[in-house]
Image: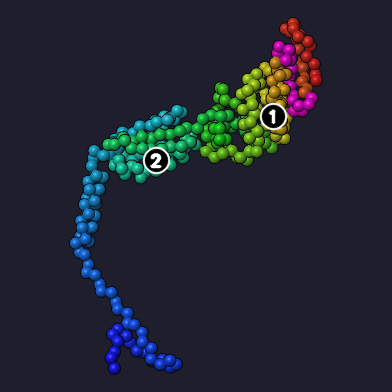
Amino acid sequence: MHKRPHLTVTASRRDGPVARPVKRRPARRPRNWNRALKFVALGLFLAEAGALLFANPALRVTRVRVDGAQTLTPAQVFAEARVPARTNTFWMLRQPLARRLEADPVVESAARSIRLPNLLVLTIKERQPHLVLATRGHLWLLDPGDVPYRALGHPLPGVPLVQATGAALPDGVTLGHPLVAPWMADVNRLLVLLQTAPGLGGEKIVVDQNLNLCLNRKDKPQIRLGQPDSLPRKVALAAAAVSAYGGALARRAAYIDVSCPQGMVWHPRPAQKDAQDGHGPEPRTE
């Protein structure tokens, strides 16, 4: 009987012998030692080149330049970045310099770059003043994102002052973290509206415990806006009242109440002298 090559016969109880193909293992390829040696040689060359590069004294950072500093001094920025001494230029890219600078609440963002062969450039963007918040006897400087970033000893000229009282006081103020207060959006809307009504510029915006808004103005009538609804209309009414009768109402009023736009109310100052006003009709309470 002629046997088929590469077949094995196994016993089966039901169908009898079954022929199955024999699996041949593929022949092993001879190892390419030349290729392996080339990779080893290349690795050794790169390691040696890297060691020479990082050890080269000509590539060490010897100069640092600070860009974007306004209130911070370059020396402060350098100190906060904690730039290591005698560090290779390329190794400096692994240092968390930007993260260290952004830990300062005054710094909104920071970046670092390298100028070969030995110059490190630290670029920062400082937060810009938007308003001063007065709360519990403390003054905090806030940026347009409602982030307090500096404690103050006194208000800043030209920066709006906002005072929260009673229940409007925030739970806490943390430098570098956005202020959590439900009325901040209304105050920001009011500040935008006041830019279109320069005659209403006040010394201070007060937010009381009922979240009513009020403009306190030195030697000028107080503007009571009430709840933050219909703010554009209230601001327009107040601006019109301040300029009414050639400004006579503003000179005579102790406060102007536009909390109800349908019925504006004003109250005269006590012991008001009328000799200064020689024009226009007599202001009255509406």
Does the magenta-highlighted stretch encompass residue 261? yes
* Residue at left offset 77%, top offset 23%: 264
Question: Where is residue 255 shown, x and y percent of the image?
Answer: 73, 21
Q: Which residues are magenta?
A: 244-263
In the picture of the structure, the residue carrying the numbered disc 2 is 97
Question: Is residue 68 among what the camera can see?
Answer: yes
Quadrant of the image occupied by residue 122: top left
- Judging depth in this view, the residue of 111 and 153 nearest the camera is 111
Q: Residues within 10 Å of mark 2 (few under 14, many from 20)?
A: many
Quadrant of the rendering where the C terminus is positioned:
top right
In the picture of the structure, the residue carrying the numbered disc 1 is 231
Question: Where is residue 63 shown, x and y percent of the image?
Answer: 31, 33
Q: Residues within 10 Å of mark 1 (few under 14, many from 20)?
A: many
- Tell me the colour scheme of the image: rainbow
Q: Residue furthest front?
A: 2
* Residue at left offset 72%, top offset 22%: 237
Does the magenta-highlighted stretch encompass residue 227? no
- Judging depth in this view, the residue of 264 and 212 nearest the camera is 264
- Judging depth in this view, the residue of 138 and 268 nearest the camera is 268
Indicate the amino acid at tag 1.
Leu
Quadrant of the image occupied by residue 133: top right
Element type at mark 2 = helix
Indicate the amino acid at tag 2.
Leu
Question: Where is residue 76 shown, x and y percent of the image?
Answer: 41, 33
Image mark for residue 53? none
